[in-house]
Image (cartoon, rainbow, N blue to C red):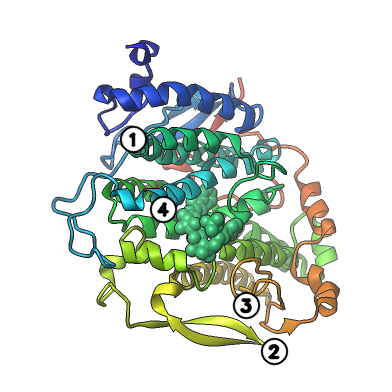
């Protein structure tokens, strides 16, 4: 068998019986080399010979998904894992509630499911593309290793979606899997599907904001798909969530360490003027707030329109549930329920009740906002500890939105609907200006690679990775 001669089966840890699945082997035989081509061209720049202390999932057991060792990233064993099946699992919501969960795709849901899986899959390589240059400006070996860990795992998440396309969608699935490697983040002719994944991630503050805010959209979307009545999708997403947790940890602690460092410098030197703060080589809290406003608002757009017939159809058919669907105490059908969404009336934002089924994007967004708020509260506690009065805040949910009821209106962070002139006047008080970007980049012109050393603009983390000391050589340049 050509596929096995190349030895891919050894290289691809899996629990999907790849060794016996000829159809899947043949599909991967074409796709895997294209994936490697994409990794070399679009993955982390000039990283291919580095030895990186990485975690590789080699099985679904708790010990198996956290296997640490030095690997060159092109030799990373991208695997295919689904959490083990739940016996007698059912469709848990919508009109098909109570039916046995589907192990094959019901014909009538094929194109809808394909669209959901392709949209999810598209984000994974997009984020790797967005981050590909950041290795050149890492603040430490610890952080360099973390971004590479995030990158290989996003690659694995792409594999997870490609597995579903190859295994369940035949020829269309194979074509979609190829297209996932052909669209590119920010490409004028062939961009990624969702807005946030075409935005540049030019610096490490943007990277940490992205992993805090945007990867968390990943958590919420994957959680909703983990409830799916299409069992292979549910089991695939559930396993992906174990990796997503680390990405959000990188984001929350990354922003947290930047905030902490700035607040400490401000307290030590008794400063609060942002120019004076910048002069000491740390990022002023006002700039951090503007980055937060940007990443939060573009991520809110990722949840889709407030009122969406697509979302209603996904739910009603049993394909995409709510966050923690089975833990919610209601009828899981929602045909008689309503939910509040925002809309613009004159110069105000008002809320109005709409059928709950159509508001499921908004509901997921609200669940997400609650979790994001607790992360921001933790950052604020670390500022408060230094005695500095500044607090970070989440802007109004209508601020800087391009999707949904408020799209097309200009909304201030405190929720006022503005004229275009008023918006233009204050835009760069609220969103990062070209000068902000230039300043942040000016701090990140080279990489810090002495083991145990950290750039001036970020505090060291509390602990190393996998009980290693902070002085560990997490990436070896040889
Ligand atoms: N940008 O009815 P609507 C992650 C499109 S992140 C551009 O409101 P629906 C990760 C929409 O596609 C999680 N277009 O949408 C994080 C639709 O177009 P079509 C990714 C947008 O379907 C970090 C049209 O507008 N996973 O994993 O209810 C690193 C009508 O919209 C946008 C998923 O998203 C936008 N922001 O909801 C790595 C889960 N928003 O189809 C990874 C799968 C909407 O009419 N996706 N549109 O041409 C979905 O469930 C849904 O597609 C969405 C949109 C929730 C995204």
Within 10 Å of disc 1 (Cα), the crowding (few <14, some 14-19, many 20+) is some
Q: Which residue is mark 2?
A: 346
Q: Which residue is mark 4?
A: 112
Q: Which residue is mark 1?
A: 167
Within 10 Å of disc 2 (Cα), the crowding (few <14, some 14-19, many 20+) is few
- What's the residue at 70%, 63% (across, down)? 288
Q: Position of residue 194 (x, y in %)?
A: 59, 53
Q: Is residue 163 visible?
A: yes
Q: Position of residue 217 (x, y in %)?
A: 50, 59
Q: CA distance from mark 3 to mark 4?
A: 32 Å
- Between tags 3 and 4, which lies in front? 4
Q: Quadrant of the C terminus?
A: top right
Instruction: Report if the beta carbon of the residue with label 1 is closer than 8 angstroms to ligand 1.
Output: no
First in residue order: circle 1 vs circle 2 = 1
Q: Quadrant of residue 21?
A: top left
Element carrying mark 4: helix
Instruction: Report if the beta carbon of the residue with label 3 is closer than 8 angstroms to ligand 1.
Output: no
Q: Position of residue 366 (x, y in %)?
A: 48, 73
- What's the residue at 27%, 33% (across, down)? 16
* Residue 396: numbered disc: 3
């Amino acid at each position: 068998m050509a596929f096995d001669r190349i030895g891919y089966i050894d290289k691809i840890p899996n629990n999907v019986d790849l060794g016996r699945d000829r159809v899947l082997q043949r599909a991967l035989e074409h796709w895997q080399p294209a994936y490697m081509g994409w990794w070399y061209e679009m993955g982390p720049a000039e990283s291919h010979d580095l030895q990186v202390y990485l975690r590789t999932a080699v099985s679904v057991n708790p010990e198996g998904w956290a296997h640490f060792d030095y690997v060159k990233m092109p030799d990373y064993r991208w695997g295919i894992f689904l959490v083990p099946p739940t016996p007698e699992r059912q469709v848990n919501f919508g009109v098909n509630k109570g039916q046995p969960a589907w192990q094959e795709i019901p014909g009538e849901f094929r194109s809808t499911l394909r669209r959901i899986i392709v949209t999810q899959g598209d984000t994974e390589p997009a984020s790797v593309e967005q981050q590909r240059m950041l290795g050149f400006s890492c603040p430490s070996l610890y952080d360099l290793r973390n971004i590479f860990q995030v990158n290989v795992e996003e690659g694995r998440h792409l594999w997870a979606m490609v597995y579903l396309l190859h295994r369940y969608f035949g020829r269309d699935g194979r074509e979609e899997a190829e297209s996932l490697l052909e669209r590119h983040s920010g490409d004028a002719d062939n961009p990624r599907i969702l807005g946030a994944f075409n935005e540049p991630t030019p610096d490490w503050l943007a990277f940490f904001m992205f992993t805090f805010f945007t990867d968390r959209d990943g958590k919420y979307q994957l959680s909703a798909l983990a409830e799916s009545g299409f069992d292979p999708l549910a089991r695939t997403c559930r396993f992906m969530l174990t990796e997503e947790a680390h990405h959000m940890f990188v984001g929350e602690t990354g922003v947290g360490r930047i905030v902490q460092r700035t607040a400490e410098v401000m307290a030590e030197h008794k400063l609060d003027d942002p120019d004076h703060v910048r002069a000491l080589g740390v990022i002023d809290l006002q700039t951090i707030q503007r980055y937060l406003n940007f990443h939060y608002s573009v991520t809110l757009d990722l949840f889709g329109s407030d009122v969406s017939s697509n979302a209603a159809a996904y739910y009603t058919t049993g394909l995409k549930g709510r966050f923690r669907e089975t833990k919610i105490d209601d009828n899981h059908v929602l045909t008689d329920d309503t939910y509040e969404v925002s809309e613009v009336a004159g110069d105000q934002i008002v809320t109005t009740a709409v059928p709950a089924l159509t508001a499921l994007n908004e509901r997921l967004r609200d669940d997400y906002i609650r979790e994001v708020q607790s992360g921001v509260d933790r950052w604020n506690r670390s500022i408060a500890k230094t005695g500095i009065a500044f607090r970070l805040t989440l802007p109004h949910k209508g601020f800087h939105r391009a999707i949904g009821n408020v799209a097309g209106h200009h909304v201030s962070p405190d929720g006022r609907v503005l004229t275009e002139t008023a918006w233009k006047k204050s835009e760069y008080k609220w969103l990062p200006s070209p000068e902000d970007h230039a300043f942040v980049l000016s701090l990140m012109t080279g990489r810090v690679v002495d083991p145990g050393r950290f750039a001036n603009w970020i505090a060291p983390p509390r602990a190393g990775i996998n009980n290693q000391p902070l002085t560990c050589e997490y990436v070896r340049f040889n």
